[in-house]
Amino acid sequence: MTKEVLIHQIIDVLSRAGFALSDRCNIRPRSFDVAARKDKTLLLCKVLFNIDGLNEETAREMKYLAEYLGGSAIVVGAKTRDQMLEDSVVYMRYDILALNVQTLYDYFVENIRPLVSAAPGGLYVSIEGDLLKKARTTQSMSLGALASMVGVSRRTISKYEEEGMDASIDVVIQLEDIFGLELAKPIDILKSCGSRKPRKKTEPVKEEPKAKLSMSLPEDLILNTISMLGYDVLPTAQAPFKAISRDKSSVILTGVSEFNTTVIKRAHLMSSISCITETQSVFIIDGRSKLKSIENTVLIEKKELDTISDSQELLDFIEERKDTHSEE
């Protein structure tokens, strides 16, 4: 299986599950490959044939983007370094949940949640602690007696009941046989996706590490201008836009560049993503722009941005330019 085949399979699964999908992010580097939405569920999906190809910087940006956009970041792949990903098993890479296409299909199409997570040392299952404790006490069985039957320590059984420790598959099978109950706790993929709290609005954009953002000075100054309008600005290094700008009432995918053919390509992609993420899409042009908008992406010259005094005025400018474009 090639990555191209894998991407088509993922798109097919999400489409069958009722998701609307953005265009594929075909601009390198990219922190995610496709955005997908179904009702209130937003996914930023990274496709990697080998999930060990995910690096820490990309994972960090995926988590930030998901948090700012109110969604979940996932990786869908086919293998790890030394083996194929197993069905109905979830993996974690830098706090990003990873799974294969079959598990994706089972969860979103068949509504079947996985039970098993992979971790160093093997495969593990979370136990419904309250059910286990109730079953044990109903049979007047001590922690020690149950521990002896299963072959673990008394403290381990206590941890299972407190849901403070996952169990091996063999142990879960033994416990379920002893009590005649299903004790494995299904994994909610969406709730298990790693996320990071956004920075407070008062924190300036300059706190983001500049070396990792690889931004030039003009781009940096423009993003700081947007921050001065009252936006919390999250610069990006691998997305098809330079930043996400957010205030209390709006979220804007924000591009920054001189006007060129690459801007047109990026603006088309940003428009597609903004439709799925339900955000605004703006490209700030450093210099003169030949166009006022590209699909849903509004192009604003830097000199026009400099005349705007606050976030509401920027939003009004965007809407006015959209309306003008639609009339044309």
Image (cartoon, helix red, strand yellow):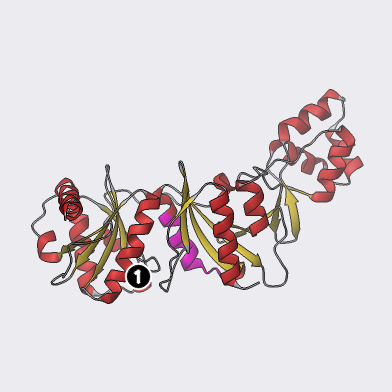
Kindly give the residue lying farthest to the left in the view shown. 307
Q: Residue 292's image quarter?
A: bottom left
Task: Please report the residue visible at 24 percent of the width from the left and 76 percent of the height from the top.
Answer: 260
Q: Within the magenta stretch, is there residue 59?
A: yes
* Left or right, 5 with reference to 125: left
| 232 shown above or below 3 | above
Q: Identify whether 280 is placed above or below 235.
A: above
Give the side of residue 130 with respect to residue 289, left or right. Answer: right
> x and y percent of residue 305 in the render?
13, 60
Residue 228 in sight from this viewpoint: yes
Q: Residue furthest front?
A: 328
Q: Where 157 sits versus 212, above or below?
A: above
Quadrant where the N terminus sits is bottom right
User: What is the chief secondary structure element of the magenta stretch?
Assistant: helix
Is 142 magenta? The answer is no
Secondary element under disc 1, as helix, strand or loop, is helix
Residue behind mark 1: 213
**Viewer can see residue 241:** no
What segment carries the magenta color? 54-65
Where does residue 34 sit, x and y in percent of width and height?
Answer: 47, 60
Residue 136 pos. (x, y %): 83, 29
Judge by depth and name the residue closer to the eye, 214 or 163. Answer: 214
Q: Pointer 1: residues within 10 angstroms few (<14), some, or many (20+)?
A: some
